[in-house]
Structure formats: C-alpha cells, structure tokens
Amino acid sequence: MNTVMKVQKVLIIGAGFVGSSLAASLQSSGVQVCCTRRQEGEEGTVQKGEEGTVQNVEEGTVQNVEEGTVQKGEEGTVQFVLENEETWRNLPMEVDGVVWTLPAKPLSQVQRLHDAYLHSILDEKKPVIVYGSTSRYHVDEAHQWVDEKTKKTQKEDSREEGEDFLQEKGATVLVLAGIWGESKNGQSRHPKSWFEKGYIKNFNKFLNLAHVDDIIKVTEEVMRRHSETRGQAINVCDGNPMLWRDIIVGPLSCVHRLYDTYLRSILDSKKQVIVYGTTGRYHVEEEHQWVDEKTKYKQTESGREEGEDFLQEKGASVLVLVGIWGESNSGQLRSPKSWIEKGYHINSINKYLNLAHVDDIVKATEEVLNRPEFIGQAINVCDGNPMLWRDITLGFGLELPATTQDPNATAPTSRLLSRPSKRVSNGLLQSIMGKDYKFKTVVDPDTTGA
Ligand SMILES: NC(=O)c1ccc[n+]([C@@H]2O[C@H](COP(=O)([O-])OP(=O)(O)OC[C@H]3O[C@@H](n4cnc5c(N)ncnc54)[C@H](OP(=O)(O)O)[C@@H]3O)[C@@H](O)[C@H]2O)c1
C-alpha cells in the first residue's frame, strides 16, 4: 500500500549546500525544521541544549528529555559533530523524519549515533534519508552505465559502509550525482566554473549531475512516500550523463569550428570527406525491425547525429557503422567470441547483433573515397547478415547461459538493452562493393540452424 506521510518536524543533519536549501523548502511548506552545523555560531543561532533538559550522552545513549520540555534549538540550528558525542544531546527528540546529509562515516560513529538516537526514529518507521554518492559504484569499464543494482566498491572505512548499515536499519539512501545549482546558503555550483577553475583534467569522462532543486524535490517525495521507499537506495541524477568535452564546447559547436577552420575548403573543392557514424542513430519502433539508410532517425544522447547531418549537408559521406570486429593494425583484436566469453551476451541473447569486419570497413572507405557519386550520402556499412546473439553463441560451439535458456527471455538492464533490437540492411553498400565484401558473417549460419 502506498501510504503518503505528512511530516511536521524534520531534522536535517548538516545544513550545507543541499541541507540549507532543503530546510528553506520544507519551511516554506509549513514544516518545522531543525538543522545542525559543526561550528557553534553567533549567540542565538547555534544553540546547545539547555543544561538539565537533555542529559549527558552515556554509553552511547541520548537520554531523558523530560516530558514537556522542548530543547532549545529544536527550531533553528543546533551544533552537532558526528565525532563529538557531547554535541549529540543537542538533537531534538521528537521528529517525524531525519535527513542525513553528511558522509556516513566512520562506521563506528554511525553505529553509535544509530544506537543512541536514530534507532527510535527508525523503529517507529519514520523516514530517515541518507545522502550517498555515486562514487559507491564499482565500475569495470569506461563509460559503463550503473544503476542501483551495480556492485559497490568495498573500501574500508568508506561512507558506503555507513550507508549500508543505515539502509539495513530502514533508512532510504539517495545516491547523489554531482550537485549543481544555487543553494539557499548563498553558494552556487556550476560545471562551467569547475572547468574555469581548472578542476577538470580529463575531458573524455562523463559527468553525472543532479540539480539541488531536484534533490530537494526527490527528498520531499521520498519522505512523503516513505512506506514505499523504506530501506531502498535510489540514484538521484538527471539521467543524462555528458562528456566533459561536450559540456564545454557543445558537441555541434566543435564540429562547426573544425568545419570553419579546416574542412570547408576540402568540401568546397568537391573532395571526399568521409565521416564514420553509427547505426545507434536509427529510430527502431519494433523488435527486430530492418533498417536502411531511409529509416527515420533521431538524436541519441551523444548528439553525434547533428554533427554527421551537418557535415553530410556540406558534402561529406557518412558511413554508418555497426559493431566492428576483426584485428586492427594497431594490434587490437575485437572478437564476438570473446565478447560472449566476457558475458556481453547474457542480457542480449534474443537480440540481433549487426557486424562489420574492420577490413571491410577499410575497403568500403577506399571505394567511397574514389566514387564521387556518393558525395553527400549516408551508407550503412555492415555484413547485411544480422544474427541473434543466441545463434552466434551456438555457432561458436559455446554454451548458452543458464539464465537465458528461455528463447523469449530478454532482461533489459540498461537503457541500451531496453531499446528494440534491429537488423541493418546493406543493400546500398552491396551495390557499391558487390562481391568484394569479404566477411559476410561472423559464424557459418549452417552450423547454427539460423
Ligand atoms: N558535491 C557533490 O557534487 C556531491 C556529489 C555526490 C554526493 N555528495 C554528498 O551529498 C551530501 C550533500 O552534499 P552537500 O554539497 O550539501 O554537502 P556540504 O555542503 O558539504 O554539506 C555537508 C553538511 O554536513 C555537515 N558535516 C560534515 N561533516 C560533518 C561531521 N563530521 N559532523 C557533523 N556534521 C558534518 C557540514 O557541516 P558544516 O555546515 O558545519 O560544515 C554540512 O552542513 C554530502 O554527503 C556529499 O558528500 C556530494
């Protein structure tokens, strides 16, 4: 049942960039808020519990708020330092929810604060929301997508240990991406200024972002729908990771600049410029749909199609490539068999794989370079013989993974896999290359029954 909870009093542990904005937002909707800061501020802003109202922290327990006594600072800001248990007495006893914004470490202190203070709130099934960070995810490959099920890094004394501990006790962990926006504490965070300050060393990395206003909205929503979100971890990000280089110059403006400074003179003199694109551009509506150069396409998240279109309009030929395999002169080997051995097929088993051998891409490129009639055209470069991962696996004499014995099973775990599978036709390329296309299939279809 989705019970919606109305909170009246909220404790925000840590009134930093997000905490202070959350406090302002909750207060504006009539919620009573108590925030914490580490430093004791000017008189009257950060308050300690009055002597005699909240007792000493003994053996890790915050004790005895006398009935009817309200600790000073319950509304407003109190001093709290995770490592200084003396300050824990300042935390208000009666709250409907807690938002924990500081890193949940060290684990020993998190556990002690849980035993002393948070457990009663969690035991009453009130929301405790803990902010985590996407750095928790263990990433094996560059540019890998991660979600809440991705395995976590196992670092000792990391915040993840504290987050896991609290999550097991019923807290909801909001796993935050890079935070930007304007905070109510007067600070502003903007990716542009991170770049200007020289923080960015590698422009080929993805930046994942969450705007502070969205973090606040999610926090309030999770608090309201606490019965559904209790004990869960939820990624909070805009879901639109971008490469730093694209954020800084904009993908298209880069292409424009290169065109203006260099490519224009080559294209204007009707010389061939070939641009490699990808079949990710095709908009596929039905599972296993055939696509050709006339299939409508839309911009992917990379936005590269805009650049390809722009150059094509200026006279470049776009070779639209599928999965590339073979041995490159750079010494790299890409083999569908090894992709299967690495488990890439596990969720794709009933999806089509479209392939082009590097040698054929080279031949197609040379052919198009010498054929001015293809100036300004897009041409699919593929073997025209898409095969199901299942058939390729069997074709190599490899075992199908146990979890995918069901021929109808598709378990999309990423956005890429949740897209319908497509089959790419190479009719136009055949008319250009004819029999010269060498690698017509990665495995012999006769051995697979395909
Ligand atoms: N910055 C990012 O892009 C990013 C990305 C992902 C996740 N996160 C995480 O998201 C959370 C919220 O981010 P934010 O930018 O709002 O953080 P922030 O501005 O640094 O605020 C953190 C708050 O926690 C308090 N705090 C820190 N250590 C403490 C301790 N040992 N004991 C008591 N209080 C302590 C700070 O107190 P004072 O006010 O006294 O300093 C501050 O109020 C943080 O846990 C952060 O690590 C940040």
Image (tube, helix red, strand yellow):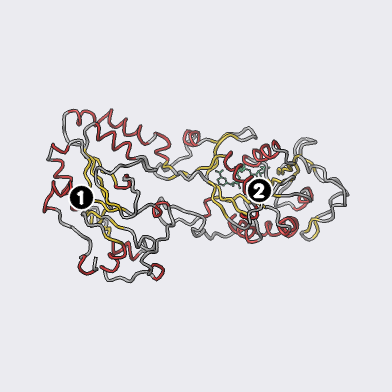
The quarter of the displayed image where residue 9 is located: top right
Q: Quadrant of residue 354?
A: bottom left
Q: Residue at x 80, y 36 (%)?
A: 44
Cβ atoms under marks 2 and 1 closer than 8 Å: no
Q: Nearer the viewer, residue 327 or 94?
A: 94
Question: Along the horizontal axis of the image, is 347 left or right of 149?
Answer: left
Q: Position of residue 229 (x, y in %)?
A: 61, 54
Asked whether 371 or 261 is in front, the reply is 371
**Looking at the figure, which quarter contains the C terminus?**
bottom left
Question: What residue is drawn where x is 15% and y is 53%?
Answer: 437
Residue type at numbered disc 1: Asn
Q: Earlier in the sequence, mark 2 or mark 1?
A: 2
In this orientation, does residue 339 appear? yes
Badge 1: residue crowd in 10 Å (few <14, some 14–19, many ≥20): some
Q: Where is mark 1, residue-wise?
A: 426
Pinpoint residue 117: horizontal percent, then vertical percent. 75, 55
Q: How many marks?
A: 2
Q: Is residue 364 above or below residue 252?
A: below
User: Which of the labelled discs sits on residue 262, or is there none?
Assistant: none
Identify the residue position indicated by label 2 in the image. 224
Query: Residue 205 appears at what percent x and percent y?
Result: 42, 45
- Residue type at numbered disc 2: Arg
